[in-house]
Amino acid sequence: MPTELLVNFNEFWTRLRADICAANESVFIQTFALEGDSIGKQLSEALLASRAPDKRILADSFTRIVLSDRLRFAPSNLFDPNLREEARETELMRTQLESAGVKVKFTNPYGISPRKLLSRNHKKLIVIDGRAAYVGGINFSEHNAKWHDMMFRLDDDDAVTFLSEDFAATWSGRECSAHRVWKKLEVLTLDGHDNRRAFHRVLELIDGAQQRIFVESPYITFPFYERLRAAAVRGVEVKIVTPQHNNWRLFRNYARLESARSGIDLRLYRGGMSHLKAMLIDDEHLIAGSSNFDYLSYRLYQEIIAIFNDPRVIHHFRERVMLPDLAYATTVDCHASEIGKRWLDWQTKLIDVAVSTLT
């Protein structure tokens, strides 16, 4: 199955811009964040110049209240001139797009219930003319474009059709959970309600690991750590790369505690923020997509997971992502106190109970 691995924003954008320019029929873009900064405006300009008659953008409502990783309505941000200017530019960009015939929708409007507050559509999906699709973790904002990340470009007809159908369902307001298997690729779409059933496939692959597991992700939590810990106990080599400078510092501390009690080889990526999410199992199964290996993705978020079994794709991932990132990461000698371990167990149980009340 023809698949291209695109590492970091510039490589991804160069490929995508060419596809948008060449589009004759449709350009469908789904993103978690859409901001009116230089990156959002690059996308806007490409869409305005495209001759495709059907151009659409889906963004989660998260991006209406969070810009540049900052909550717009927090007291400390309300009068920040830069944030206010970016909010104005974002709204102006959207107005210009809509005036030119580009349709823009926001998914998952906020409400007063806990589920309405927490449940987000976290997918990153682009479909061009029904002939090519992109999946991965990159959003359209300046801070996200600076992060280490990746996207995959697919041009298999069946896979692109499947992803086109998922975009159409989300556009019409339907949340879909589906699973398709081809010779060298599996794709799972998660609806935010039945995610645990879909993630059973990922946990099954972790449980079946025989030799080694490599994980790179900024936000790993339970239940994934439990399965990785069990794999390490039975002798599987487990390596985790997570950013040294995490935009959510709590997760770096969480990783230290978990790795200390699990005997997992933890590495801290020194090249800035890594937003990349990938898991390579026995050099045979590469799990990637929009989903983090965290509890919110496991229970509440709408996501896309791709499982690649193509040796060529896995080879490219090893050479272009895994090996360079391991070389650019610092080994952590983790020591966790018994108090820290008990605190982690207590926190895990508390969050599990709290989220269970929402579903």
Image (tube, rainbow, N blue to C red):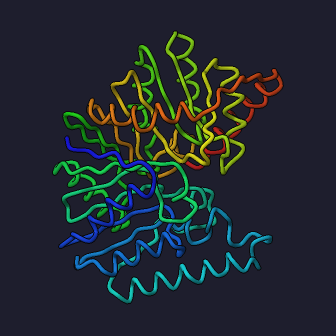
Is 40 left, or right, of 223 in this rendering?
left
The image shows residue 165, relative to residue 152, as above or below, that is below
- Could you say which quadrant of the image residue 187 lies in? top left
Q: Which residue lies furthest to the bottom in this view?
A: 99
- Total numbered circles: 0
Is 140 left, or right, of 173 in this rendering?
right
- Residue under the point 26% across and 49% down: 154
* 29 or 40: nearer the viewer: 40
- Could you say which quadrant of the image residue 76 lies in? bottom right
- Residue 153: x percent and y percent? 30, 51
- Could you say which quadrant of the image residue 30 lies in? bottom left
* 54 or 155: nearer the viewer: 155
Q: Residue furthest top?
A: 235
Location of the N terminus by quadrant is: top left
The image shows residue 188, relative to residue 337, as above or below, that is below
The image shows residue 79, relative to residue 147, as above or below, that is below
- Residue 278: x percent and y percent? 45, 38
- Residue under the point 33% across and 66% down: 17
* 110 or 207: nearer the viewer: 207
- Residue under the point 37% across and 24% down: 283
- Residue under the point 54% across and 78% down: 90
Is 338 left, or right, of 43 in this rendering?
right
